[in-house]
Amino acid sequence: MEEIKTDSLKEKDEVSEDMQLLNDVTKNEYKWGFITDIESDTAPKGLNEEIVRFISMKKEEPEWMTEWRLKAFRHWQKMEEPEWPNVTYPKIDFQDIIYYSAPKRKPQLESLDEVDPELLKTFEKLGIPLEEQKILSGVAVDAVFDSVSVATTFKETLKEKGVIFSSVSDALKEHPELVKKYLGSVVPYTDNYYAALNAAVFSDGSFVYIPKGVRCPMELSTYFRINNEETGQFERTLIIAEDNSYVSYLEGCTAPIRDTNQLHAAVVELVILENAEIKYSTVQNWYPGNSEGKGGIYNFVTKRAACRGNHSKVSWTQVETGSAVTWKYPSCILQGDYSVGEFYSVAVTNNYQQADTGSKMIHLGKNTSSTIISKGISAGKSNNSYRGLVKVGKKADNARNFTQCDSMLMGEKCGAHTFPYIEIENNTARVEHEATTSKVGEDQIFYLNQRGISSEDAVNMIVNGFCKEVFNNLPMEFAVEAQKLLAISLESSVG
Amino acid sequence: MGNDLLNVIELSDFNLPTMKNEDWKYTNVAPILKNNYVLGTSLGYENYLSLPLNDYFFKDFDYYKVVFINGIFVNELSDLTGLESGIIVDSLTNFQKNNSEILANHLNKYSAIDNGFNELNNTLSTNGLVVFVPKGKVVDKPIQILYLNGDSNENVLSVPKNLIIAEENSQATIIANYHGIKGKEYLTNIVTEVYAGKNSIVDFYKIQLEEENSYHVEKVQAYQEANSLFNHYNFTFGGSITRNDINTCLNDENIESHFYGLYLAHKEQHVDNHTFVDHAKPNCMSNELYKGILDGKSRGVFNGKIMVRRDAQKTNAYQSNKAVLLSKNAIIDTKPQLEIFADDVKCSHGAAVGQLDENSEFYIKSRGIPKDIAKSMLIRAFAADVIEKIKIDELREQINHLVFEHLNRVEVKNN
């Protein structure tokens, strides 16, 4: 901390102590940046039907899958890049992206010893020592390095319960009927521009299937990692929870520092059947660009859950601190009667980061309920937008929604915006929406100061309190990580 | 009057907004485009003189009386006796003749052309109302304007352009009262600009009681100087499609703005209220309260935007929008929007949609009060927050009455 403080205060002539602290925040370099040197099996730059076929062939996919990709690609060509979000970024040249790169692959790995040591080192730097996790934490890790899954642990334990947790490409080989039935059923390739692109070129992702009546014995976790320079990563996650099942899924990301912007257009599909529950938690800490706003990841994600069965439940929890441009709206389609959708989010933007994020709750079944808690924190010159939709359909009797979106501004050059859409077509609906915007009060800091707490800690306490409702919904390991992340992102900020 | 003298307007000549436009996402103006319209100013007002025009006015309090028929200022029906010298209430055309300099300083200075309707008004309007209150003057009575629109034989288009100028330290209360003539479908398309000078106070009441086969589109654009206070009260009862844009720009310090709105709709009425409060400078305060009561197959739209610009530190901006759906088929789309670029601000917005509370109704009924009155009491309670903000007692009572009349329910009076 101390060393950062000293070199960061030169730009303003008259900076209050508060402002100084604030500047420190903006100056914190991304702590987890490094590039691993592994030879990649890479497709040439650009995108055309050949590339789509190449990806499909590389992954040894069945014929119908190739066709599906091609359909998506043809549809994508007809679509236009959307411009409605409250973000600005240079146009993406889709022909300048490498759509496939896989780490050199040995025949199927049995144990971690066979994994490329370089790769393992990367994970260790990230604090994800596979071996340790295997022994200690009981978390099965499907580690996605660039585009291909290289190691999957705990498959055996899960197998006993009948849980399938693998990469989508493996699932395509082993359970093609399941993939065929559900892939694209929640987010069709026609859904939006980036969903179409993802459908055409997705490289890999996670596939989870929880059979009837099974409560997944451990939290499933996938660590994403963008590694190969100029590789857009197109992940596709598909989780199916059969009747009376439960799974908690964790997704966490970090990426190395570099200068060219990278596109990440993932699609996450969740299918929840009767009485089942999926808890999906994300900590997103991709490279946000440096303090001048150069570099950083474009994170354009389509996440959607379909609560198809009665009494089904989905819960999205996300902590977003990274990416130069974030654009995502985890959504819940509440089709089943008495189904429940939840969305808890903390989005922190700093420097030149831009985030346009929120949630959609589509109430279709009777007696459905949903909750949206969104906390946005903007600092530096960033812009943080909440955009959400609550829709209650004609037949959704007694639907209930509560939405709260609070923003906190730190510094005078950032922006906080809310764009909530509320569309109600049923008079038995009860929908409430609240939004507030505030800053960390001088009086609050003063109060904590006079209790002997430094301004530094005071801000941390206040911000943590501001986000508490969301952190409480994170699984334990993630809650710890999230608080650390927040502390790093806002190491010494005062508004 | 021969048809050859009538000025027929084809709306397709104007680029009217479609639902693809984000600001018109929930409002389909296609039904308006079905007709060709005769420009009201070419129609004349002689046929209307025999109508009991006085019945249209809100009564039991003193006011200056102004009558517009299909967008034409009717001098002989207006009554401005007793108006203090210096204060001008006149038609736009007359004002232009006598005070062209003042007009040039204000007309079209505040309202930009945002869409096809504004353009329509801008292109076709030749008349409207000007209220000019010079420095230090106070208009002692409210100015009540009756806008009577429509015709039994023609589809009429009225395009009045109004301008309210309240100079430094002045005060004025305006009641704009819209009524219609039973007959053919008609379109009223108004642009009103309000200039609230330093330390001025402007109260603007709008009560829209147009015929239910009519279309009503108004844009109010206020521009406020330091320490000014602008209150806008917006009551919508009539109209098949109604669209209000109420905007204010707080362009100096210590300004206050209040927007109050109550909209009622039944059958297949469509009411769309858009508000925009633009905080450009520090230390200002704005407050907004909109409530909707929707019955039948009606649809309500509310879009409230608060912008707090970089400079506007210490802004307090509040907004609340609530709607109650009385029937199974009513629809509400609401979008409260905050755009904040300054950190030291207190802003909040709230939106709630629901139906009348069953428990409350049960409680009232259990006290021996019949069901219909119980419901009316709850409606009364819901609407009261807005109605009670009306500063003129008699007007408040009459609007309360209108609420029940329009919902076709037993009236519960103010105690």
Image (cartoon, coloured by chain):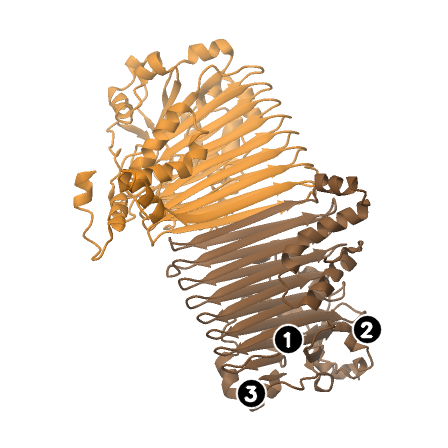
Whether labels 3 and 2 belong to a single chain: the reply is: yes
Taking the image as shown, residue A396 lies to the left or right of residue A345, namely right
Taking the image as shown, residue A338 lies to the left or right of residue A328, namely right
Find out whether the residues at labels 3 and 2 contact each other: C-beta distance under 8 Å.
no
Residue highlighted by disc 2: B152
Q: Position of residue A269 (x, y in %)?
A: 51, 30
Q: How far apart in space, not on screen, are marks 1 and 2 (Cα)? A: 31 Å
Residue neighbourhood size for the residue with mark 2, other residues' Cα within 10 Å, grouped as few (<14), some (14–19), many (≥20): few
Q: How many marks?
A: 3
Q: How far apart in space, not on screen, are marks 1 and 3 (Cα)? A: 16 Å
The image quadrant that residue B15 belongs to is: bottom right
Amino acid on which the number 2 mark rests in the picture: Ser
Chain B colour in the picture: brown
- Dot 3 or dot 2, earlier in sequence: 3
Taking the image as shown, residue B415 lies to the left or right of residue B173, namely right
Q: Nearer the viewer, residue A461 or A218?
A: A461
Residue highlighted by disc 1: B142
Whether labels 1 and 3 belong to a single chain: the reply is: yes
